[in-house]
Amino acid sequence: MRIVELRQYVLRPGARDTLIELFEREFVAGQQAVGITVGGRFRDLDDPNRFVWLRAFPDMAARRRSLESFYTGPVWREHRDAANSTMTDSDDVLLLRGPGFTPLPGAREVLATVCHPSDATAFNAYAARHLTPGHALHRTEHAENDYPRLPVRTGEDVRVWFGPVEPPPWPSRRLRLEPVTA
């Protein structure tokens, strides 16, 4: 299992496609060059001002090294002002442990569920009945965020998976996402 960030950005009205174009042109390769695996990138189908994406790292130490390299490197320095000008909030980040996720080629819509189970044993029983390896189940990584320049949500225990499934009996949020294709 890898360390995965599920990042949900709130954007200025009308700025989503501007960010996506910049992201695909500059930030995917720029992050990959420093050891970051960039996973799925999505338009939120229920909110035209949201961009959702995932990136993964082998472990927390590699995460810190890669983030330091990227955010002090030339790609971010050159394009950060343009990227930041599209956003009103980039701090909705879940730090997870899981396989990562990239949609299958040609996928038009992906469902993602962010669930807050109250009982880990009961959730495990639910997962055994309803989730397959194809759902790419992720769990909160409770390690301290060792790159505090980029905040992550803390104080909650979540499970995140991708694909349709019977709704869980715990508080959850379902995201309808359209994959961004390069």
Image: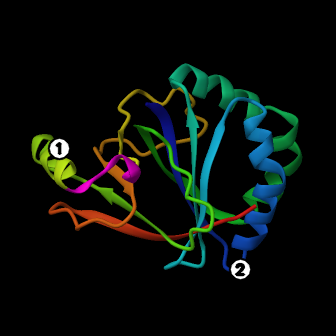
> Where on the picture, by quarter, is residue 178?
bottom right
Q: Which residue is mark 1?
A: 124
Q: Residue at x 22, y 57 (%)?
A: 130
Mark 2 or 1: the one toward you: 1
Q: Residue at x 51, y 43 (%)?
A: 5
Q: Is residue 115 magenta?
A: no
Q: Position of residue 84 (x, y in %)?
A: 73, 57
Residue where numbered disc 2 is placed: 14
Mark 2 Cα shell of 10 Å, populated few (<14), some (14-19), many (≥20): few
| Residue 42: image location, x then y, percent | 59, 64
Dot 2 or dot 1: first in sequence order is 2
Quadrant where the N terminus is found in the figure = top left
Q: Which of 57 and 11 lies nearest the eye of the viewer?
A: 57
Residue shown at the point (83%, 50%) measured from the top left:
26
Up the image or down, 144 lies above or below 51; here it is above
**Image vertical order of residue 47 relative to residue 153, above or below:** below
Is there CB contact under 8 Å for labels 2 and 1? no
Kindly report the secondary structure that dominates the magenta region of the rendered protein: helix
Q: Secondary structure at mark 1?
A: helix
Q: How is the image coloured?
A: rainbow
The disc labelled 2 sits on which kind of residue?
A: Gly
Marking on residue 81: none
In the rendered image, residue 40, in percent from the top left (x then y), is placed at 59, 54
Q: Which residues are magenta?
A: 130-135
Mark 1 surroundings within 10 Å by alpha-carbon count, few (fewer than 14), some (14 through 19), many (20 or more):
few
The extreme top residue here reads 61
Q: Amino acid at mark 1?
A: Asn
